[in-house]
C-alpha cells in the first residue's frame, strides 16, 4: 500500500496574504502546506481521504490519473469543499466516484452541493455513488477500512485504520476504546496544529505524547499550521520515530 500526503496544512496558517512570518516566507517547499488530505493506493483501488478546497491542485500536482473513492473524516469546509472537482475523473474514467460519508457529512454535502443530488440532472454534473458509513468496518475493493471515532472538540469525527496504517486528523481527545483500535499499527498519522494549546486540536506536545503511547514504527504529524514553526527546526527536536509530514511525501506501508 502506498500513501501520499496531498496536503499537510490547515486553514489556520494558509493566509490569503502572507503574514510575513518565517514559515509563510520560507523557501523550503516542506513549509508550503495545502489543506490536509492523503492518497491511499492499494492493489486494486485509489482512494482519497477528504477533498478540501485545494483538491484540484493537489491531484494535478501529484499526477493522479485514477480515482475510485473519497472517504470523509468530517463535514468541515476544509475537508469537503473540493468535491465538485471530481468531474474530470468522471469524464476521463467514464465512472462514478464512490463517496463514503456518515449522516452529518452526507447532510453537509447535500447542502453544499445540492445540484449533485438534485432530481434534475444534466451532462457534466459530478457523478457519485454515495455509501453511508457508521462505526462499522467497511470494504473498499479488497481492503478493510476501520472507522475510529475521535473528538474534534465536541464534534465526533472519524479517523481510519487501513491494515497497519492509521490516519487521524483534527483530534482533540481519543477514547480508550478508540485507542485500542489503533494499537499495533505500524504507521500512525496524527494532527499537531501548533505548539500552544488549542480548543479542538492536539498541539505538538499532545501529539507527541499520543505517538509515544501508541509506539508505532513511525509516526507522521500532519494538519500543521504556520504557528508550529519551520519544518526543519521542529523536526530536529522530535523524538525518534516521529517526523513531520510534508506535501508530496510518499511512503510504503
Image (spheres, grey):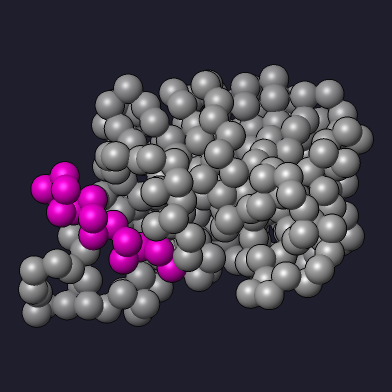
Magenta region's main secondary structure?
Answer: helix
Residue 89 visible in the shown view: yes
The residue stretch that appears in magenta: 81-94
Q: Position of residue 132 (x, y in %)?
A: 31, 55
Q: Quadrant of residue 48?
A: top left
* Residue 141 % position (x, y): 27, 31
- Observer-nearest residue: 172 or 113? 113
Residue 231 image-quadrant placement: top right
Residue at image position (69%, 43%) is 30
Position in image of residue 241 (x %, y %):
77, 24
Q: Is residue 111 left or right of residue 24?
A: left
| Lateral position of residue 37 relative to residue 94, left or right | right
Residue 173 drawn at (x, y percent): 72, 53
Left or right side of 90 for 201: right
Quadrant of residue 104 in the image? bottom left
Q: Residue at coordinates 88% horizontally, 33% vertically from top-left?
A: 236
Amino acid at each position: 500500500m502506498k500513501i501520499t500526503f496531498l496536503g499537510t496544512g490547515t486553514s489556520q496558517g494558509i493566509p490569503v496574504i502572507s503574514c510575513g512570518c518565517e514559515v509563510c516566507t520560507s523557501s523550503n517547499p516542506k513549509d508550503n502546506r495545502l489543506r490536509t488530505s492523503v492518497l491511499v493506493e492499494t492493489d486494486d483501488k485509489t482512494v482519497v481521504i477528504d477533498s478540501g478546497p485545494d483538491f484540484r491542485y493537489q491531484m494535478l500536482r501529484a499526477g493522479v490519473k485514477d480515482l475510485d473513492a473519497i472517504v470523509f473524516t468530517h463535514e468541515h469546509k476544509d475537508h469537503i469543499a473540493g468535491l465538485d472537482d471530481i468531474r474530470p475523473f468522471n469524464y476521463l474514467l467514464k465512472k462514478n466516484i464512490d463517496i463514503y460519508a456518515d449522516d452529518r457529512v452526507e447532510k453537509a454535502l447535500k447542502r453544499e452541493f445540492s445540484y449533485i443530488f438534485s432530481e434534475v440532472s444534466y451532462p457534466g454534473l459530478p457523478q457519485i455513488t454515495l455509501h453511508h458509513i457508521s462505526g462499522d468496518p467497511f470494504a473498499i475493493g479488497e481492503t478493510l477500512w476501520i472507522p475510529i471515532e475521535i473528538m474534534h472538540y465536541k464534534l465526533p469525527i472519524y479517523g481510519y485504520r487501513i491494515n497497519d496504517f492509521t490516519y487521524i486528523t483534527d483530534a482533540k481527545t481519543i477514547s480508550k476504546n478508540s485507542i485500542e483500535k489503533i494499537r499495533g499499527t505500524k504507521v500512525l498519522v496524527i494532527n499537531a496544529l501548533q505548539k500552544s494549546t488549542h480548543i479542538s486540536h492536539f498541539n505538538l506536545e499532545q501529539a507527541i505524547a499520543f505517538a509515544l503511547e501508541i509506539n508505532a514504527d513511525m509516526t507522521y504529524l500532519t494538519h500543521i499550521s504556520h504557528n508550529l514553526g519551520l519544518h526543519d527546526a521542529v523536526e530536529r527536536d522530535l523524538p525518534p520515530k516521529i517526523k513531520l509530514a510534508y506535501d508530496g511525501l510518499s511512503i510504503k506501508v
